[in-house]
């Protein structure tokens, strides 16, 4: 599945087990060359702020959980919209969540920066679907 267009992935989830599984599937399938894990929406936003002037360190794909303490997926998306256009254009957001709340799902997939909603766990098939979406230039 190697694809050079995905250099860096940012995993944002407060669950260490989910992060471990997602990181391993990304590494095994060679979906991305590098994976950075953040355990909260707040630390993910801080990371983006710290690298916003360094294009190479900006993630191509952000896997974002919805249900996290303090800064959840909704707050993250609200804050993400305040970033410069260069960041919003480069970083493609995929929701990776165990939530099955229809209202939450609809609200989040209507966000212009979210390109896909995936129910945990992350799978090779889901990564292939994402590769297709990215190849189509969403």
Image (cartoon, rainbow, N blue to C red):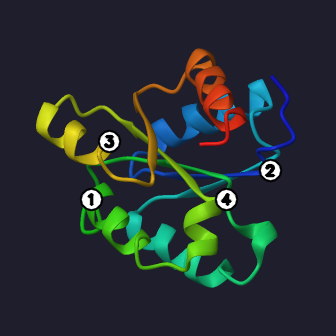
Q: CA distance from mark 1 to mark 3?
A: 11 Å
Q: CA distance from mark 4 to mark 3?
A: 20 Å
Which residue is disc 3 drawn over?
109
Please report whichever mark, 4 or 2, sits nearer to the chain's N-terminal start.
Answer: 2
The quarter of the picture where residue 76 lies is bottom left
Horizontal and vertical percent position of residue 124: 63, 18
- Secondary-structure class at tag 3: helix
Q: CA distance from mark 4 to mark 1?
A: 19 Å
Horizontal and vertical percent position of residue 34: 78, 50
Asked if labels 1 and 2 touch by Cβ distance under 8 angstroms, the answer is no
- Secondary-structure class at tag 2: loop
Horizontal and vertical percent position of residue 98: 30, 31
Q: Residues within 10 Å of mark 1 (few under 14, many from 20)?
A: some
Which label sits on residue 7? 2
Q: 61 or 65: nearer the eye?
A: 61
- Secondary-structure class at tag 1: helix
Which of the image's four quarters has the C terminus?
A: top right
Please report whichever mark, 2 or 3, sits nearer to the chain's N-terminal start.
Answer: 2
Which residue is disc 4 drawn over?
59
Seen in the image, is 100 located left or right of residue 55?
left
Asked if labels 3 and 2 touch by Cβ distance under 8 angstroms, the answer is no
Please report whichever mark, 1 or 3, sits nearer to the chain's N-terminal start.
Answer: 1
């Amino acid at each position: 599945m190697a694809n050079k267009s995905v250099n860096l992935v940012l995993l944002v989830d407060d669950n260490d087990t989910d992060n471990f599984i997602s990181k391993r599937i990304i590494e095994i399938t060679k979906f991305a060359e590098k994976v950075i894990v953040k355990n909260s929406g707040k630390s993910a936003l801080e990371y983006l702020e710290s690298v916003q002037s360094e294009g190479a360190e900006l993630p191509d794909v952000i896997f974002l959980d919805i249900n996290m303490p303090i800064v959840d997926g909704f707050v993250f998306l609200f804050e993400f919209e305040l970033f410069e256009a260069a960041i919003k254009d480069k970083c493609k957001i995929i929701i990776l969540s165990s939530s099955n709340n229809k209202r939450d799902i609809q609200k989040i997939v209507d966000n212009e920066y979210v390109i896909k909603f995936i129910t945990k766990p992350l799978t090779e098939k889901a990564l292939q679907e994402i590769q297709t979406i990215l190849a189509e230039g969403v």
